[in-house]
């Protein structure tokens, strides 16, 4: 397995966007992708980077990526790593590359004194759920993800009296 994992640079933003689009297409969510290269450059490498990206390469060819950022656990009083996206191109799956990306992030979490590594998985994605559970991941079935976006986010913000 000739895999290497490297930190992404601003020059990787077109590649990152292509991986995001491929992932969204697989998840049947391509219609929701509004990200562009300029937005990635600003949010990942601008004055205040909001997330980090690592690129998985097989024999110097990019085959996938992981995008992650820190969160925080009040119960642990420690930071955590939240994995937003993990993607390996279909032709390269089953070779251990996804496992190596997760192992890399686990090692990074330990190095940064994080108490946990977390991510979401779509309910219908049985192959991913089985893969994650084979690594020791536990589904958090007692929790429901909530999201406010778009007009609902704007409307709620308008209600702030401060």
Image: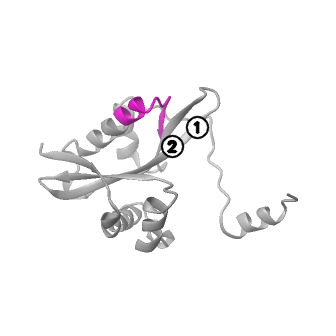
- Give residue 10's position: percent from left, percent from top: 35, 64
Q: State how far apart marks 1 and 2 are (Cα).
A: 7 Å
Identify the residue at horizontal 48%, vertical 73% (top origin): 31
- Give percent across and percent down for residue 41: 42, 67
How many numbered marks are there?
Answer: 2
Q: Per the image, is 112 magenta?
A: yes
Image location (x, y in percent) of residue 27: 42, 60
How is this picture coloured?
A: one colour
Q: Secondary structure at mark 1?
A: strand
At a point 71% along the width and 63% down the height, the residue shown is 153
User: What label does residue 93 carry, if any?
Assistant: none
Task: Pick whichever, 44 or 103, lies toward us.
Answer: 44
Q: Are marks 1 and 2 in contact (CB under 8 Å)?
A: yes
| Spot occupied by residue 18 in the image (x, y as percentages of width and height) | 33, 68
* Up-down relation of residue 43 to residue 108 (above or below): below
Q: Nearer the viewer, residue 35 or 8?
A: 8
Residue 72 has which mark? Answer: 1
- Say which residue label 2 marks: 70
Query: Is disc 1 surrounded by few (<14), some (14 to 19) or many (20+) residues within 10 Å?
Result: some
């Amino acid at each position: 397995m000739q895999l290497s994992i490297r930190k992404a640079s601003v020059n990787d933003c077109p590649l990152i966007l292509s991986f995001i689009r491929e992932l969204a297409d697989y998840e049947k969510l391509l219609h929701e992708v509004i990200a562009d290269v300029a937005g990635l450059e600003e949010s990942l490498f601008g004055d205040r980077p909001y997330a980090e990206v690592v690129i998985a390469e097989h024999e110097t060819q990019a085959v996938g990526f992981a995008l992650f950022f820190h969160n925080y656990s009040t119960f642990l009083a420690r930071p955590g790593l939240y994995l937003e996206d993990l993607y390996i191109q279909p032709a390269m799956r089953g070779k251990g590359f996804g496992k190596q990306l997760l192992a890399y992030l686990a090692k990074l979490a330990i190095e940064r004194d994080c108490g946990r590594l977390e991510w979401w998985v779509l309910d219908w994605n049985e192959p991913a759920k089985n893969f994650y559970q084979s690594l020791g991941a536990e589904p958090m079935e007692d929790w429901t993800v909530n999201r406010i976006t778009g007009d609902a986010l704007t409307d709620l913000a308008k209600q702030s009296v401060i």
